[in-house]
Image (cartoon, rainbow, N blue to C red):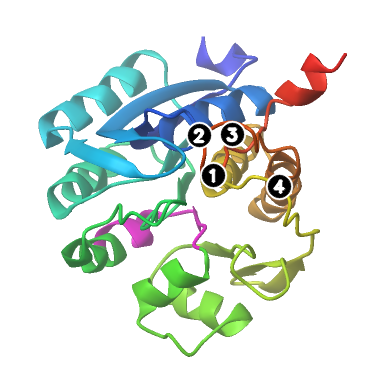
Amino acid sequence: MSGSRVIPVCLAIAGSDSGGGAGIQADLKAFAMAGVHGATAITAITAQNTRAVIAVEAVSPALILAQVRAVVEDLGVQAVKTGMLGGPETIAAVAQALGELPRGVPIVVDPVMVAESGARLLAGEAEAVLRDTILPLATVVTPNVPEARAITGRHELDGADLARAVLALGPRVVVLTGGHRDVATDVLVDADGIEEIAGPRHPDGAAHGSGCTHASTLAARLALGDDPRAAARHARRIAGDAVRDGLRDIGNGPGPVDVLGLLRRAAR
């Protein structure tokens, strides 16, 4: 059955955003846009909107494991994307779940640390656990500059040097995203070298959920058969367009990205 499947399955292991802009909600939109079926294992429930994260409640490690196993055993998965993991217990459960995946399933790790509103989503004591247990399992890791500096402790680095410092922690490929850089260029580093993935900056767009959208699109393209470099190029373009088309009039804070082109469809 799985050999004849037309639509790949991508599993997002991440937190839920009640405002619908980031987290699991953004992942599912990006998966749908990419043409894959999205499944989820929710790690935490957040009460948040465009202005703030008001409350966070972690899902039990046992239930996280149960969600992943339920999806893998019945649907199968062609790629996995991780997002908000929260604390050490959650990270340990996710590391166990990733270790149980069939051999060869690509894993994209978005090391979510801080929400667009500024709220911290990864406990400080969990950074080392994420670095030591999740990053070595990653096919691709997609940090922004602050996340990469926090993970490596190399706050003086940027660009290719910073990406190489993350690569030294064990993932196969690092895509340092460009949203926090002077030039909005992603930097990909792997064993074969460096590639800069350029794209325009959209300062008048809306960026809430951009990192989730980028990582989920990248995972979907891996599930569809792209190599990591091609997947990263595609993800940069899709995430950039989603920021450009972002829903600036939703909420009173940074609006959500619009990967589905809702405004364009409404204008027809």
Tell me whether circle 1 and circle 2 mark residues in contact (CB < 8 Å).
Answer: yes
Of mark 3 and mark 1, the one earlier in the sequence is 1
Of mark 2 and mark 3, the one earlier in the sequence is 2
Mark toward the viewer: 2 or 4: 4
Relative vertical location of residue 254 with respect to residue 70 in this rendering, above or below: below
Residue 36, by quadrant, is top right
Tell me whether circle 3 and circle 1 mark residues in contact (CB < 8 Å).
Answer: no
Residue positioned most to the bottom: 156
> In this figure, which residue is indicated by the disc labeled 3?
223
Marks 2 and 3, how far apart at CA: 23 Å
Residue 78 visible in the current orientation: no
Does the magenta run of residues contain 142? yes
| Residue 205's disc number | 4
On the image, the x and y values in percent for residue 150 come to: 36, 74
Give the residue drawn at x 55%, y 46%: 254
Which residues, given as a range, are shown in magenta?
Answer: 133-143
> In this figure, which residue is indicated by the disc labeled 2?
21
> In this figure, which residue is indicated by the disc labeled 1?
208
- 221 left or right of 63 in image: right
On the image, the x and y values in percent for residue 18 come to: 37, 28
Residue 39, by quadrant, is top left
